[in-house]
Structures are given as structure tokens and as C-alpha cells.
Amino acid sequence: MSEHIPPYGSYSDLMDTGQWHLAVDISRHGFGAWLLPDESLGTSPRVVIRTSWQPSDEGLLKRIEDAVYDNPTVLDDYSADIIVESDRQLWLPASLYPTDDDCADAYTSIYGCDILDVMVNDLGSEKCAFMLTPGLKSFMQRSFPGARIWSQQALLKEASVQPHEAFKCLLDIRQSTFDLILFRRGELLSASTHLWKTDVDIAYMLLNILQTYDASTHDTEVVFSGMRDVRQSLGKTLQPYFKTISQKNHDLDGKEIPTAVYLAINRKKRYAYHTR
């Protein structure tokens, strides 16, 4: 199913690409693109496309390319943030892996992909190397020159840079996968992506990760985001056992959007850590 720009009204205001910002979300499950207007326009964000498909590595790049070419609006000269939802991410200390090539070498030694397909986000003391499917990086560089390219975990980590008294866990739930990022006093301990079928799968992995790092539930703050029904159900179940459980609603003009997209378009514009 796809959701496109509605066929009404004038698109003349879209011609001034300097007044709009493009946010794109790419995953094994689908493709989404949104246009965010400058405040001076006094208009609402636009959904360019939101389409989904059955997840499969085979033919994934072709499906992504078709989604872009079938919606040429996204190819206009907008400033852009591109989020790549990957379950193959590698976090590395910048002190030991100072360059992107160092990170890409380490990534390929584990996952066996072509080094040219590896993308890297630099978040200061840590770097996150990631890829989704062969050829995607070069396709994005051709199609979205100058865009900031993010892994979803890098945006989640960046959103929680403040020191915490003890443990803090960010848990973002998406269709069939979820990200779990654990901090201790503001320092990153663990970042991982997991498959899930039921709420029990998510709760089990959360408790397992906490046990691995000797994090008591009574000393842990949990922040849920992502799929509303699932996270709210989990929050009610787990609330009695944790220090604090909070919920993050990420909406754009009243419609729920992926957490990473929300974080990308609301981050401080002068924050410089990104991948091109």
C-alpha cells in the first residue's frame, strides 16, 4: 500500500526547494518520504510517499529505486535527511577506529560485504557502521547528493546524550524488529536490533540485556517509542517493575511517523555529526 501527495491544490510552493526539507526512511519493509516546510510558508508537512512490501534481501535495491523514480518529487534539490533502518550495525570506539575506512574494514570483517557499501555515522566518542543492501549507498549518493545519511540507532543514541543517574534504556518498536539501546550514566553500553513476534519477545530481550549488564529494573529508566499499541501494552505490563517507564509519541501533523524520522527532522540544525 502507498500513500502519495493528495491530488489537489497548487504545487507552486514546492518549486522553491529552499523552503522545504526532505526526510526519507528506507528499510527492508518499505520506503517513506516527507516534505517539511519552512515556518514562513504557514503550511503543513506533505507526505510524498509511504509504501510497504514484504521484507526480503532479494530485489530490495530495485524496490527502493522504483519507489524513488516513481515519485520524482523526492529527486528535487531539497536539503535532506535519509534514514536507513538496518539490523546490521556495528558500534566502535572512535579512539580505536579514527577514520571511516577503519570502521568499514572492521564491518566487512564481520559481515563480509563490499567495503564500498558501508556507511558510517560519527557521534564523537563512538562511530556506527551500517549497511542495508548492496548498491544502496552509491544509489543514495547519486540520487540525494549532500544529504545526511543516518542509521536509526545513531539518531536514537544522539537523542539521549544527557547524563543519567543510573541506567537508561531506549526501546524503539517497529514492524517485526525493535532497537534496544542501553546507557549507564550517559555512556553507551549496548545497542542492538532484534526480531519480535509478540510482546513477550520484547520483554524477554529487555530483561535479558539488563541482566547481562547488571542493571536492576529498579535503577533503570525505560523510554518506549515506535508502534503505539505495542509499546503502551508493554508499558502497562512492566510499569510495576521499573524505576520509570515513559512513552514517546512521534507524530507529524497528527500522523504517526517512524521515530528516526521524527528525530532527524527535529534535531538541532547546527549539530554537525552526520554521514554524507
Image (spheres, helix red, strand yellow):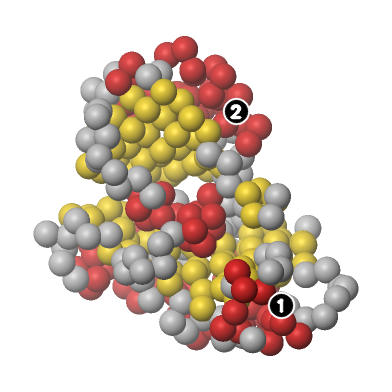
- The quarter of the picture where residue 36 lies is bottom right
Query: How far across and how far down the image is residue 205, in percent?
Result: 42, 29
Residue at 27% in and 53% down: 91
Q: Position of residue 47 (x, y in %)?
A: 71, 65
Q: Is residue 170 above or below residue 30?
A: above
Q: Which residue is label 2 attached to?
A: 232
| Circle number at residue 20 | none
Which residue corresponds to the image point at 68% horizontal and 65% vertical from the top-left? Answer: 45
**Three-letter amino acid code of the residue under disc 1:** Asn
Q: Seen in the image, is 230 located left or right of residue 83?
A: right
Q: CA distance from mark 2 to mark 1?
A: 34 Å
As rendered, which of 134 and 212 lies closer to the eye?
A: 212
Residue 33, above or below 244: below
- For this view, does 16 lie left or right of residue 3? left
From the viewer's side, name the closer residue of 276 and 163.
Answer: 163
Rendered image quadrant of residue 180? top left
Q: Which quadrant is home to the C terminus?
A: bottom left
Residue furthest left in the image = 95
Q: Identity of the amino acid at label 2?
A: Gln
Q: Which of 10 and 128 lies nearest the eye of the viewer? A: 10
Residue where numbered disc 1 is placed: 71
Which residue shows up at 77% across the image and 62% down it?
3
Q: Is residue 68 visible?
A: no
Figure quadrant of residue 101? bottom left
